[in-house]
Each structure stands twice: as C-alpha cells, then as structure tokens.
Amino acid sequence: MDLIFKIAWRNIMRHKGKSLVIGAILFMGAFLMTAGNGVVSGMEQGLKTSVVKGFTGDIIIMAKKQKDDNVLMGMMAKAVEPIYNFKEIRPVLEGQPYISGFLPAGKNMAIVLNEDGGTPGNAFVIGVDFDKYKEMFPDNFKVIEGNPPRPHEQGAMVPSGARQQFYDFTSIWFIPESTSLDTANLTDDARANRNDLSIKQNAVLMGFNADNSTNDIRLPVRGIMKYRSLNKIWGHFVLMDIESYRNCLGYIAASDKVDSIAPEKKELLGMEDENLDALFSDATIMVANKKSSFNEADLKHRKSASPALKTVDLETGAYNLIFVKLKPGADRAKALVELNKALEPVNARAVTWEKGLGPVGSMTILIKTALFVFVMILFFVAIIIIVNTLSMAALERTSEIGMMRAVGARKGFISKMFFAETAMLSFVFGGAGILVGAVAVKITSLFAITSDNDMVQLLFGGDTFHPMLTGVDIFLSIFQLALVTCIAVIYPLKVARGITPLDAISRD
C-alpha cells in the first residue's frame, strides 16, 4: 500500500497541470457544496426561529369541517371555521407526551371602516389571551409606540406594516390611546401630508363570520409593534384580545356565558302565548305606588358582584386555531399522525405549519428544494468534469500504464494506483474546499446581511442572513466529496484497466 501511494504521488507531481485542473474542480465543488449546506441549514434554523418559535408553532389545529388547510394566508378564502369545544380539546393535547405547549387563538379577516367616508382597509386579525401569547411566543415582537394591553384589557396591537397599509387605503394614521403623534415614525407620504393627517386612537373593525354575517366593534389601539422576524409578512396580522375578536366576528364570547338571567325573566321566557297577552291587560298595567328602599352598602355590594372580565373563563368561548409546539427532538411526522388520531373524537384535525401558511409555506419548501437541487447539480457537474479529465489522463498515460503491465503489474494494482491518485487529490483540494467553505459561511454570518424583500426573507429564514454549519453539515460535505470521488473514478479506472502491454508499443 505504501508503494501505491508513493507511485501515486510521483504521478501527481509528474502531471501537475492535469492534477491542478482536477484539484480545482474538486475544490470548487467541495466549497460550493459546503456553502450550499450552510445556506440550507441557516434557512431551516431561521425559519424554525421566525415561524415555529415566533408565530405558528410546529403544528396548527383547526376544526374538522374546515376544508382549506391554508388558514393563515388566505386572502379571498372563506372565514376559518370556529372551534367551540376547546375545553374538550385541551385534555387531549395535555395527554400527548411530545407536545411542549399550545395556544388557542382566533384568526380571520376584518374590514377597517373609514369613519371619514373614504375607502376602507382590511387586515388579518388574530385574537389571543395576551398573557398566554407571551408565554407561547416570547419576544416575537417589539413595541414601537404605546404598550401591550394589560391583563383582561380590551385593545389591539397594530403592526407598523399594517398601520402603513391602513394609511395607504384610508388616509388614517393610527396611534395608541393616551399618546401623541410621534413624527419620527411617519412614512414619507404621511409626513408630507402632516397638516391634513387624520389621526385616530381607535379603530372600527367589521368582521365576517362563516355564515356571511357581519358585526362591527370600536376597539382602542393600545400599541404599535414590529415583529422581530419576517415583519413584512407577519406585519399584516393585527393582534387583539380574544373577547374583542369574538365580538367582532359575531362568535360566542366567554362573557356571554356568565350572564345570568333573573328569575322573573326566566318566568317571562317560559310563559305561553295567552299568558303573554295577559301581561298587557288593564289589571297588570295598573300597579300600586309602592316605595322601594335600599341602603348604600347593598348597592355597593351589587356593583362589585357584577361579572367582570377578569372572572370570565376565556377558554369557554370560540376559537379558530390552536398553535402547537413540539418538544425538542420530537418526530413531527409521527406526532402529526398520532395527534390526528387523538383529535378524531373531538372533531378537530392538525396540519403542519407549512400547510397552514398556504403559499408562504409552499414557497419555503420550494426555496429549500431549489437550493438542494442546486447543490445536486453541482454534484453531478463535478462528477462529469472529473470523469472526463481522469479518462483523458488515463489515455494519455497509455504507454506508462502499458509498460507497468508488461513488467508484471496486475489490473488490481493499476486500479489501486489510479484510485490513490484521485483520493489524494480529493483529500487535499476537496478538504481545502470544505475548510474554505466553512470559513466563508462563518464570515458571511458575521456580516448580518439584511433585506426587506419578502421572498429574500424566506430565503434567509428571517430578516437577517445567518448561514450556519453543524457537525451534520460538515459530515454531509465530506460524504458528498467522497461519493463524488468514488463515482467519478469508476469509468477512468475501467479505461486504465483496459490498457494492455501491447498498447504500450502501439503507434498510430
């Protein structure tokens, strides 16, 4: 074996030109494959942080009768079907060992009415319990103006992108309640129209229900926010408290279920028709002038005993979706199958976040596939070029190999020698390509390249380009390099093994 490597090294040095050509191809192939793996891994990690950890979770649960999986980004789709039995779904989710957390939420589209008589706007609205939302998706947005709603307080958090969109459609500039206009946050158009700017601290929203009925509410704007990642995409989603969302969409609110009916009203509702007519007889209209009495303490007690929002069990009202996070290391495909089986009795079903995001989720898959195909194209191009170069090298060395066969070298020895030459070139130049690729990925990540383009952000996996290499990626690059070497040397080996001693003395 030592002799084979000595001869291989001598041959490499004797044919430096061809060796450098093959080495350069191996170097570029290894470099591009390593960089490509870094981009794909960075995108996957960025999407996991920006989408899974910051907005949707790993899995999205919806009502079983919801037909379209695209429940988040459907612009002209039907309203998302409501979930009225979250109380039944909760124990099912709590019983799954692979789930780390979940958040019920409302999601649909609402029209932002223009009280000045102009063109209305529109927005995706998400209704949540803000306390639980922060637990599920901590630090996924930063507040630019105002403050998030306090516990059990009604109000909306409007993204900066949605505010700009509202201004473009309605010429209204929304600011949080109890705040003054911050001119530093005005867009160029709004700043130019500063004197005639229509400023509002609350919004009138009209929601559309699944049965095509409408309802509108006036909701205070509590704050203006910016999503930390993919703000261009998530910036269309207005967050509001879940009870206001239910009122806007005409759903059953949790507060509706705590309203008690007085005994005399129950008696009235239970009367027959003839008894109802009797209510308006002369005998019932004439009543005695009776003086009522009450004390102040009793009045105060009655006021404090009135149902308050903080006493309402928010989970008894309607939702549309449930965002689910899986535990680290959980197999999502397996978890999805098991979860759908468990949800069958409670009339719910689960899909991946990619399906729930519709075209955006499909675009992420398309971009990842395109990157993978790009790496594979490099893989095959490198193989073809190396095969041709090695084959030509073998034919040009016909006399040398033929003489070696003439003095007793067997085909196996020729094969080992040729393979050793290719392996040494692959180790030196390919290894250098992997190292340079890893350094390039690290340096590129330090530049923290940003973009405002939606599609580029999907490629980046967020607002910032952070390619990264894991141990698995390095191993994959080494494996790809070894595979390229082994495949590329097969045909040249066959050519070299076919050279006979007679070929060494033959002349054209």
Image: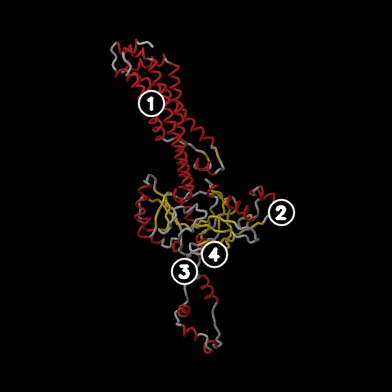
Residue 292, located in which quarter of the rendered image? bottom right
SS for tag 2? helix
Please give the residue where the numbered disc 3 appears in the rendered image. 258
Q: CA distance from mark 3 to mark 2?
A: 47 Å
Looking at this rendering, what residue extends furthest in the front direction?
A: 508
| Residue type beneath disc 1 | Ala
Q: Residue at x 45, y 80 (%)?
A: 267
Label 3 or label 1, whichever comes before in sequence order: 3
Q: CA distance from mark 1 to mark 2?
A: 71 Å
Whether the residues at callouts 2 and 4 have beta carbons within 8 Å, the answer is no
Circle nearer the viewer, 3 or 1: 1
- The one nearer the camera, 181 or 411, is 411
Please give the residue where the numbered disc 4 appears in the rendered image. 215
Circle nearer the viewer, 3 or 2: 2
Please give the residue where the numbered disc 2 appears in the rendered image. 195
Circle nearer the viewer, 4 or 3: 4
Tell me where residue 285 appears, x and y as whole percent.
54, 87
Label 4 or label 1, whichever comes before in sequence order: 4
- Give the quadrant of the N terminus: top left
| Residue type beneath disc 3 | Val
Circle nearer the viewer, 2 or 4: 4
Whether the residues at callouts 3 and 1 have beta carbons within 8 Å, the answer is no
Label 4 or label 3, whichever comes before in sequence order: 4
Residue 217, located in which quarter of the rendered image? bottom right
SS for tag 4? strand
Label 1 or label 2, whichever comes before in sequence order: 2
| Residue type beneath disc 4 | Asn
Label 3 or label 2, whichever comes before in sequence order: 2
Left or right: 246 in relation to 204: left
Tell me where residue 350 appears, x and y as whole percent.
40, 53
